Each structure stands twice: as C-alpha cells, then as structure tokens.
C-alpha cells in the first residue's frame, strides 16, 4: 500500500508581474513551464538548457528553480505550497 504525504509538493503558487497569484497542480505548472521552455529557450539557466528535451527541461525548472526571466525585468516565480486535507 503506497502512502501519500500530507505535505507533498503537489501544488504550486505561480506569480507573474501584474497578475493575481495562481494555484496550480504540479501537472499544470509543468505544462506552463514546457510552454516557457519552448518560448524562452534562450533565457533558460545553463543547467536546465543542458537537459535533453522539453519535458526534461521543464522538470528541471520545476524541481531546481523557482524563477525564470521571461523578458528583461519580467520574471515568473513559483513556489511549492502545502494544502491541508
């Protein structure tokens, strides 16, 4: 029987300048990060850019970063949050 942690990183808050914060599931955040990996490939941190493929790059961003510069002076930020059951 698999146990689930009450405090797993299944949800994230996404902050974008000038927009209300969004609560996203890990799947939703990964989908957004995949879109940004494609759109902002030149802005990816070097360790993320070295990953092979969009899926791996998005996963590396989700797991190892909490910010991506979308444009000069405009950063997206995301943080794992704990939702109580």
Image (cartoon, rainbow, N blue to C red):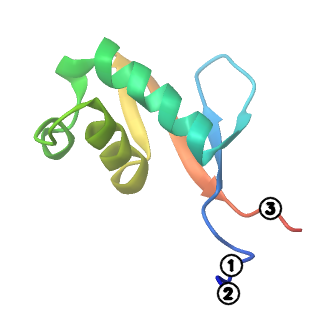
> Residue at horizontal 16%, vertical 42%?
51
Q: CA distance from mark 1 to mark 2?
A: 13 Å
Task: Name the element at disc 3.
Answer: loop
Residue 17, placed above or below residue 12: above
Q: CA distance from mark 2 to mark 3?
A: 22 Å
Q: Position of residue 11 (x, y in %)?
A: 67, 52
Of mark 1 and mark 3, the one earlier in the sequence is 1
**For residue 83, which quarter of the picture?**
bottom right
User: What residue does disc 1 label?
Assistant: 5
Residue 37, placed above or below residue 60: above
Task: Name the element at disc 2.
Answer: loop
> Residue at horizontal 58%, vertical 41%?
27
Task: Name the element at disc 1.
Answer: loop
User: What residue does disc 2 label?
Assistant: 1
> Residue at horizontal 30%, vertical 17%?
38
Give the quadrant of the C terminus: bottom right
On residue 83, the disc is: 3
Picture mark count: 3
Mark 3 packing: few (<14 Cα in 10 Å), some, or many (20+)? Answer: few
Mark 1 packing: few (<14 Cα in 10 Å), some, or many (20+)? Answer: few
**For residue 82, which quarter of the picture?**
bottom right
Q: Position of residue 34 (x, y in %)?
A: 40, 27
């Amino acid at each position: 029987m698999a146990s689930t942690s009450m405090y797993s990183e299944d949800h994230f808050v996404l902050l974008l300048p000038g927009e209300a914060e969004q609560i996203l599931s890990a799947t939703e955040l990964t989908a957004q990060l995949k879109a940004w990996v494609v759109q902002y490939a030149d802005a990816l941190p070097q360790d993320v850019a070295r990953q092979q493929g969009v899926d791996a790059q998005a996963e590396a961003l989700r797991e190892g970063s909490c910010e991506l510069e979308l444009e000069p002076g405009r950063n997206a930020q995301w943080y794992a949050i704990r939702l109580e059951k």
